[in-house]
Image: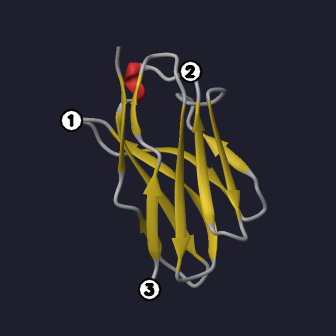
């Protein structure tokens, strides 16, 4: 059974930084990444990292966010710098199982406010 445990959300001032982590267990994983959902908006994709460490980012976060992964610990990270109020959202990690299926974490709140 695939389990995802997220951590690292919180309240930060504009221009600040946060680092999200998501530890996955129960399978082998291909792509890992993050989505986010702001109040009143649809969930949007943020970033993805493949097993070979290729990365892709949404235009809105490129240059400010960095995604990485530890394949030994099956953990994906999202380093968020220069945070803006519009980055406020619930952030969900996701993983693509090597044997099929995509799985989402429970979400962690990120609030950017002065």
- Outermost left residue: 40
Relative depth, front residue between 23 and 64 = 23
For the point 52% across and 83% down, the residue is 26
Instruction: Name the disc covering residue 72, or none.
Output: none
Q: Place residue 105 in its image quadrant.
A: bottom left
Side (left or right) of 89 relative to 73:
left
For the point 61% across and 79% down, the residue is 98
Q: Position of residue 91 (x, y in %)?
A: 40, 46
From the viewer's perspective, is the residue at label 3 or at label 1 nearer?
3
For the point 42% across and 19% down, the residue is 13
Side (left or right) of 30 relative to 58:
right
SS class of the residue under badge 2?
Answer: loop
Cα distance in 3D space between marks 3 and 1: 32 Å
Name the image quarter holding the N terminus: bottom left
Badge 1 local density, few (<14 within 10 Å), some, or many (20+)?
few
Instruction: Name the disc covering residue 1, or none.
Output: 3
Side (left or right) of 74 relative to 113:
right
Relative depth, front residue between 12 and 76 = 12
Badge 3 local density, few (<14 within 10 Å), some, or many (20+)?
few
Residue, disc 1 = 40
- In the picture shown, does residue 65 fall above or below 7? above
Badge 2 vs badge 1, beta-carbon distance below 8 Å: no
From the viewer's perspective, is the residue at label 2 or at label 1 nearer?
2
Badge 2 local density, few (<14 within 10 Å), some, or many (20+)?
some
Which of the marked residues, 3 or 1, is nearer the chain's N terminus? 3
Q: Position of residue 77 (x, y in %)?
A: 60, 50
For the point 54% across and 53% down, the residue is 21
Instruction: Name the disc covering residue 82, or none.
Output: 2
Name the image quarter holding the C terminus: top left
């Amino acid at each position: 059974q695939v389990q995802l445990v997220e951590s690292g959300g919180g309240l930060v001032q504009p221009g600040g930084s946060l680092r999200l982590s998501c530890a996955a267990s129960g399978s082998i994983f291909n792509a890992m990444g993050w989505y986010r959902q702001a109040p009143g908006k649809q969930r949007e994709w943020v970033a993805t990292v493949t097993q070979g460490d290729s990365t892709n980012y949404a235009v809105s976060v490129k240059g400010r966010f960095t995604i990485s992964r530890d394949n030994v610990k099956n953990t994906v990270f999202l380093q968020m710098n220069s945070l803006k109020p519009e980055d406020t959202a619930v952030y969900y990690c996701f993983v693509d199982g090597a044997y099929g299926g995509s799985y989402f974490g429970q979400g962690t709140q990120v609030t950017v406010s002065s």
